[in-house]
Amino acid sequence: MTMKKIKILLVDDHQIILDGVKTMLIDEEDIDFIGCASNGFKALEIIKSQLPDIVISDISMPDMTGIELTSKIIELNLPSKVLILSMYTTDDYIYNAIKSGARGILPKQDTNKEMLMEAIRTISEGDEYYASNISKNLMKSYVSKIKNINSIDKSKNYSLTSREKEILKLYAEGFSNQEVAEKLNISIRTVETHKNNIMQKFDFKSTVEMVKFALKNNIVSF
């Protein structure tokens, strides 16, 4: 049976980055590298015509930023998912990237081929991927931000099992499915089942939304 390949478009205004990432991907059997674009406008034209599965994009680019490109993809209801690969990983950039609809974020300076391929494959399967240092910093910073957010009805019964609370806390601390499974001595499949149950109970659309909710409502805390 023919392997379904993941169609990739790379967007960055630095040729050295385009060349380097292309070299990482070009020999992978499950990757179909469809091309490069140096800015968001060029990328959008390619996305409309070729519908890549994943767009790997920088944030800071001339004419149209990676965040603006991501928002445009969502606005036009295009199926492509965006993985941000950027040297800018401060809180504001991360929040804006997630808000725009990015499905993953990796720091350029710390990303190797193994991490990049893991992110691509994770996102292609419908999940999200954030480098562990980004996840931890992001979730910890939410602790201070939620003090200014009105909390929702505390009388609501959140009906989480003790195991679900354990798993939710570990996600909030930035651990991956594999790491959660190892810490709790359970299978990855079991972790994913509990995660899916939590998300279905509260109609969460993403892991980040799930963790934000947990922090905001003191279901878990640091």
Image: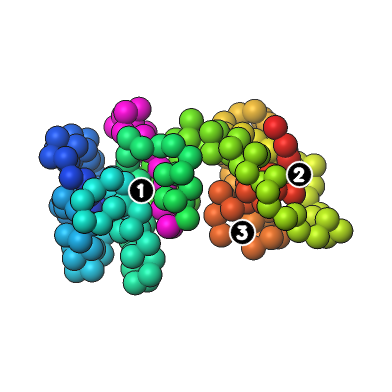
Q: Position of residue 163 (x, y in %)?
A: 75, 41
Q: Residue at x 19, y 37 (%)?
A: 17
Residue position marked by numbered label 1 in the rendering:
83
Q: Give the residues in magenta.
A: 100-117
Foreground: 48 or 182? 48
The amino acid type found where label 2 is placed reads Asn
Q: Is residue 94 above or below residue 206?
A: above
CB contact under 8 Å: marks 1 and 3: no
Tell me, for residue 26, which label it has, or none.
Answer: none
Residue position marked by numbered label 2 in the rendering:
218
Is residue 187 a member of the stretch shown in magenta? no
Q: Residue at x 21, y 45 (%)?
A: 12
Label 3, residues with CA under 10 Å away: few <14, some 14-19, many ≥20: some
Q: Is residue 107 left or right of residue 32?
A: right
Q: Is residue 209 visible?
A: yes
Residue position marked by numbered label 3 in the rendering:
204
CB contact under 8 Å: marks 2 and 1: no
Foreground: 100 or 128? 100
The amino acid type found where label 3 is placed reads Phe
SS at badge 2: loop
Q: Is residue 20 left or right of residue 116?
A: left
> CA separation, marks 2 and 1?
30 Å
